[in-house]
């Protein structure tokens, strides 16, 4: 690179953020095209009418259009619905902004784990071009924001568990408020934060100098998790019929396996239904082959990658599945839409490890590696 012009060197040094920005821009354009080609549909119209009128006391048990008492989406959409009415572009502003933030947080997350151009490109392609995310990121429904909250949860948890001592009190307060908002946003908020915390704990518990073994971190984390759990129990209690609170909105039973087959009857179809929705884009389905690296002994990250897959992805989907069975509700892709960025990150992480292994083997030859 020493003999190349200065502007070429600059572009090369910025190749990763540039590639991510281009992929993200295309993905966002696809989301805008999707919104432009449709009108508000039934569930969105129902949620819209739940937000009309005087603002509800969201600290109490109220319903906001998703048959639960979690007010997070109501809080951010209410003022826009009052001002724009049923103008789809106006009422979708909060979710559009959250989508932009989601791409930025995804980039920050990848920077903490990935080192190669190939890893970033794979992760961003799967995140940007996932058909479910393209279809639902700009929906007037709570699940459209869940991918951003899940990505943010993983990024901020990594900061807490790895750099707690270096964070200021304002950083710690900000992370705590983000986690609290995530929990009051949707019933799955505490679910995926708990899975993320479990992964971070298991990934670091053997480290003798781990941040999580320090007294300040222990006090902070226990206090934070107790607050999160109390908030979640309060808003979830009517839906789960706890402490004498019963759900008043009649939802009726839905056939759980209308969209994804029953695993007892058709396990292969169940498996295809899940992974097909995690990948969706036909021309990117080959990227799943990168997961083979978790079985290669030369991959020093393989145990963390396996742990991440089984905890944040596997247990995440299983929790949604069991809750769908318990509530007699559809088990369908938008219920586990928050797992999809985790899967994109996981596949990107696997390709990153493969690229690093290839670089390590060839570093003595002087051969140029395009994937660096």
Image (tube, helix red, strand yellow):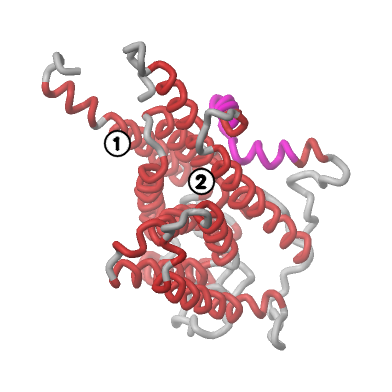
Q: Position of residue 77 (x, y in %)?
A: 43, 67
Magenta stretch, main secondary structure, is helix
Front one among 184 and 96: 184
Q: Residue at x 59, y 63 (%)?
A: 191
Q: Secondary structure at mark 1?
A: helix
Asked if residue 88 can be seen in this view, the reply is no
Q: Is residue 73 left or right of residue 326?
A: left
Asked if residue 110 can be seen in this view, the reply is yes
Q: Which residue is mark 1?
A: 17
Q: Which residue is mark 2?
A: 341
User: Is residue 53 placed above or below 47 in the rendered structure?
Assistant: below
Q: Residue at x 46, y 51 (%)?
A: 138
Front one among 303 and 181: 303
Q: Quadrant of residue 328?
A: bottom right
Q: Position of residue 305 (x, y in %)?
A: 55, 41
Label 2 CA crowd tier, 10 Å (few <14, some 14–19, many 20+): many
Which region of the structure is painted magenta? 271-291
């Amino acid at each position: 690179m020493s003999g190349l012009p200065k502007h070429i060197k600059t572009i090369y040094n910025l190749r990763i953020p540039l590639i991510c920005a281009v992929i993200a821009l295309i993905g966002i354009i696809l989301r805008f095209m999707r919104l432009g080609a449709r009108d508000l549909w039934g569930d969105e119209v129902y949620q819209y009418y739940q937000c009309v009128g005087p603002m509800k006391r969201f600290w109490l048990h109220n319903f906001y259009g998703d048959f639960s008492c979690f007010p997070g989406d109501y809080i951010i959409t209410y003022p826009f619905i009052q001002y724009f009415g049923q103008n789809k572009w106006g009422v979708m502003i909060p979710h559009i902004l959250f989508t932009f933030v989601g791409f930025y947080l995804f980039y920050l997350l990848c920077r903490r784990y990935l080192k190669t151009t190939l890893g970033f490109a794979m992760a961003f392609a799967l995140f940007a071009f996932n058909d479910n995310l393209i279809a639902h990121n700009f929906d007037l429904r709570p699940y459209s924001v869940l991918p951003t909250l899940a990505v943010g949860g993983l990024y901020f948890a990594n900061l807490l568990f790895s750099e707690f001592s270096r964070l200021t009190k304002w950083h710690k307060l900000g992370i705590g408020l983000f986690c609290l908002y995530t929990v009051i946003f949707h019933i799955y908020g505490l679910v995926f934060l708990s899975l993320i915390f479990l992964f971070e704990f298991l990934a670091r518990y053997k480290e003798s100098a781990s941040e999580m073994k320090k007294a300040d971190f222990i006090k902070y984390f226990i206090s934070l998790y107790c607050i999160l759990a109390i908030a979640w129990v309060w808003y979830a209690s009517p839906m789960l019929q706890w402490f004498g609170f019963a759900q008043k909105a009649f939802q009726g039973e839905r056939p759980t396996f209308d969209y994804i087959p029953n695993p007892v009857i058709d396990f292969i179809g169940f498996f295809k239904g899940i992974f097909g929705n995690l990948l969706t884009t036909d021309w990117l389905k080959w990227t799943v082959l990168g997961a083979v690296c978790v079985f290669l002994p030369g991959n020093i990250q393989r145990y963390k990658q396996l742990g991440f897959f089984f905890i944040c992805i596997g247990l995440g989907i299983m929790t949604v599945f069991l809750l769908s069975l318990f509530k007699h509700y559809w088990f369908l892709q938008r219920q586990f839409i928050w797992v999809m960025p985790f899967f994109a990150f996981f596949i990107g992480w696997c390709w990153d490890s493969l690229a690093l292994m290839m670089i390590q083997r060839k570093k003595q030859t002087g051969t140029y590696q395009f994937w660096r």
